[in-house]
Image: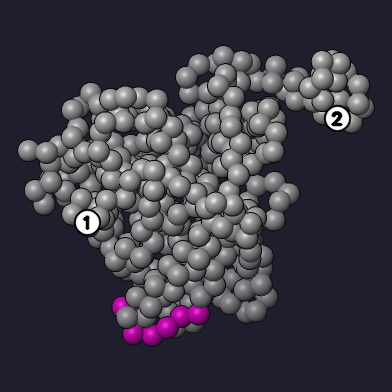
């Protein structure tokens, strides 16, 4: 019997307070999160951002119990999916590959090889494709494949995005309908979709399809919701979790909440549309920060739809995706990892700075010193790097 490996890809999250700094460093070291024209600045800048943000982020994780539940939930999703697939006659084993924290992608690949898997289906737990989420995970997997002869010979099929999957759409609509019916005035409840944002330049300059997929997905959910309820609710789409001074997709969720309050909305149902698991953005940013903003602006009843986690219909939907992928036309890893032609990614150094998932080869403070030297010389026009012709 053919042994199929299901590789579930997700972002990852710090499970303990002391993991927050290294996690942030890994996140901002990725050129698909912050794109810089000078590769040498990537890791020093990641060290600087992770150092400056660690204290605030640690407080946020403390507010939700001291760490992210994302790994636990993702591993539970993997077990549930494996069980459903085996009930369907597919001898599947599920693996979890996190992009920026344990278990890292290379660990999942090692397990796949050790288990003698015959074929792999790669399923990102991001319903909507983006350069910075699915794209980054696919490219990391592609990098590992190119440097590993045994892994390179293993057949791989990929699911690039699945925002229109019926199990996903129906699950979201069912959970939203429960909250609407639990409100004081169901027909007056306003639905506020909030998706993780991306820099606007990704969409307008690099051709990222994320915004279009989010918008199409919200319409599909609203249509399904109306079928379930028998009446329609007003809705708004917004974006959260932006980082840095660059403009991200608008409208921002906090601005939408203020406007809805000023418009007299009293019943609000908040829907984390791009998140399939509870984590820091749902448990802290939405449940604490955004709830406070809503209440301050006159919204009396703030109801948040829970993340899908292991909702049975959602898991069935994931199983449908895997089944269709195995039976349908093959989407290779090269196809899945291909980014729009306008995307420019800069090669990363082979040596590693600061925190990393292999070893602490370079201390982050050394990276910061180098970064400051670059800044000083760019401003002053003097220094050792000018002397040897590097600037």
Residue 38, by quadrant, is top right
Asked if the magenta segment contains residue 232, the reply would be yes
Q: Is residue 26 above or below residue 328?
A: above
* Span colored in magenta: 228-234
Asked if the magenta segment contains residue 349, the reply would be no
Q: Is residue 75 above or below residue 263?
A: above
Whether residue 100 sits left or right of residue 150 in the image: it is right
Whether residue 271 is visible, yes or no, is no
Of 87 and 376, nearer the camera is 376
Dot 2 or dot 1: first in sequence order is 1
Q: Which mark is residue 378?
A: 2
Instruction: Give residue 165's position: percent from left, percent from top.
Output: 31, 63
Q: Which mark is residue 328?
A: 1
Q: Main secondary structure of the magenta part?
A: loop
Query: What element does badge 1 sit on?
Result: loop
> How was the colour assigned to the protein in this rendering?
one colour
Whether residue 94 sits left or right of residue 241 in the image: it is left
Query: What element does badge 2 sit on?
Result: helix
The answer to the question of whether label 2 and label 1 lie on touching residues, with beta carbons closer than 8 A, is: no
Which quadrant: the C terminus?
A: top right
Instruction: Give residue 64's position: percent from left, percent from top.
Output: 50, 42
Residue at x-position 23% and y-position 47%: 81
């Amino acid at each position: 019997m053919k042994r199929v490996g299901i590789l579930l890809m997700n972002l990852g999250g710090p499970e303990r307070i002391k993991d927050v700094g290294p996690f942030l460093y890994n996140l901002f070291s990725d050129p698909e999160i912050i794109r810089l024209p000078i590769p040498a600045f990537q890791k020093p800048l990641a060290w600087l951002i992770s150092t400056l943000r660690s204290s605030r982020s640690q407080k946020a994780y403390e507010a939700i119990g001291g760490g992210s539940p994302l790994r636990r939930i993702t591993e539970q999703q993997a077990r549930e999916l494996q069980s459903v697939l085996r009930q369907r006659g597919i001898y599947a084993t599920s693996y979890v590959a996190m992009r920026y924290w344990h278990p890292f992608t290379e660990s999942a690949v090692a397990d796949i090889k050790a288990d003698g898997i015959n074929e792999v289906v790669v399923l990102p737990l991001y319903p909507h494709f983006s350069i910075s989420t699915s794209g980054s995970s696919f490219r990391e997997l592609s990098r590992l494949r190119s440097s590993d002869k045994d892994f390179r010979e293993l057949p791989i099929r990929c699911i690039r995005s699945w925002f229109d999957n019926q199990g996903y759409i129906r699950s979201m609509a069912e959970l939203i309908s429960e909250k609407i019916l639990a409100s004081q005035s169901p027909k007056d409840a306003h639905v506020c979709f909030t998706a993780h944002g991306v820099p606007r330049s990704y969409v307008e300059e690099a051709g990222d399809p994320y915004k279009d997929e989010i918008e199409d997905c919200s319409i599909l959910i609203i249509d399904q919701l109306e079928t379930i309820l028998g009446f329609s609710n007003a809705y708004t789409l917004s974006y959260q979790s932006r980082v840095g001074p660059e403009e991200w997709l608008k409208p921002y969720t906090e601005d939408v909440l203020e406007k809805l309050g000023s418009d007299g909305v009293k019943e609000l149902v908040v829907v984390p549309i791009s998140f399939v698991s509870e984590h820091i953005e749902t448990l802290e940013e939405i449940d604490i920060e955004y709830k406070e903003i809503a209440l301050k602006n006159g919204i009396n009843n703030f109801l948040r739809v829970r993340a899908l986690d292991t909702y049975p219909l959602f898991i069935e939907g994931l199983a449908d995706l895997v089944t269709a992928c195995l039976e349908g036309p093959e989407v290779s890893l090269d196809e899945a990892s291909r980014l729009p032609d306008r995307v420019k990614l800069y090669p990363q150094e082979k040596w590693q700075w600061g925190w990393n998932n292999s070893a602490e080869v370079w201390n982050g403070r050394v990276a910061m010193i180098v970064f400051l030297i670059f800044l000083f010389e760019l401003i002053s026009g003097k220094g050792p790097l000018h002397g040897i012709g590097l600037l």
